[in-house]
Image: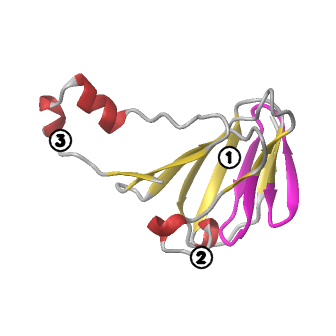
Amino acid sequence: MEVRYTIGKNEYKHMSTEELRDTFLVELFEEGQLNLLYCEVERSIVGAAVPTSGALNLEAGRELAADYFCQRREVGVLNIGAAGTVTIDGTDYSMGQLDGLYIGRGSKEVSFASADAGNPARFYFVSYPAHTEYPTTQAKK
């Protein structure tokens, strides 16, 4: 998981184009990878999963100091690619293009898979700390 910190309101005025890109540009979609970016300002995490050869698991990593990713977080997922599946604690959610999914706090096992590895799903997600558990809910296009 990449971690980015806030810069001062006047600091960016003195940055080169390359420094601005390194600081603000977010590039997450990479075939066969699940990438995460933690922004310390609001403790938000943005991520992308593009499963090709197999399912990609959403894991907490040491940065969250949690046993599993959704231990204290909720996640909103949007599929902007081809058909795929999000599996949460053994329950499969079939995701077509532009389908959404809310994953509630307390969900232990989350994985992303594509229906066709040659034409993969592209899952974009955003996660924030959660203080209450709500049920996982799917929203079809």
Residue 97 at x, y percent in the picture: 78, 31
- Sooner in the amino-acid sequence: mark 2 or mark 3: 3
Cα separation between marks 3 and 1: 31 Å
- Mark whose residue sits in front, 2 or 3: 2
Q: Amino acid at mark 3?
A: Lys
Q: Residue at x 78, y 38 (%)?
A: 99
Residue 21 at x, y percent in the picture: 32, 29
Q: Is residue 97 above or below residue 103?
A: above
Badge 1 density bin: few <14, some 14–19, many ≥20, Cα 10 Å: many
Q: Residue at x 45, y 65 (%)?
A: 63
- Sooner in the amino-acid sequence: mark 2 or mark 1: 2
Q: Is residue 81 above or below residue 112?
A: above
Q: Helix, strand, or loop for circle 3?
A: loop
Quarter of image, res 90: bottom right
Q: Helix, strand, or loop for circle 2?
A: loop
Residue situated in front as seen by the camera: 25 or 9: 25
Residue 33 at x, y percent in the picture: 63, 43
Q: Residue at x 75, y 35 (%)?
A: 121
Specify the segment rendered in magenta. Answer: 87-111
Q: Which residue is mark 1?
A: 77
Q: Which residue is mark 2?
A: 67
**Horizontal side of residue 12 vs 76, given as left or right:** left
Q: Helix, strand, or loop for circle 1?
A: strand
- Mark whose residue sits in front, 2 or 1: 2
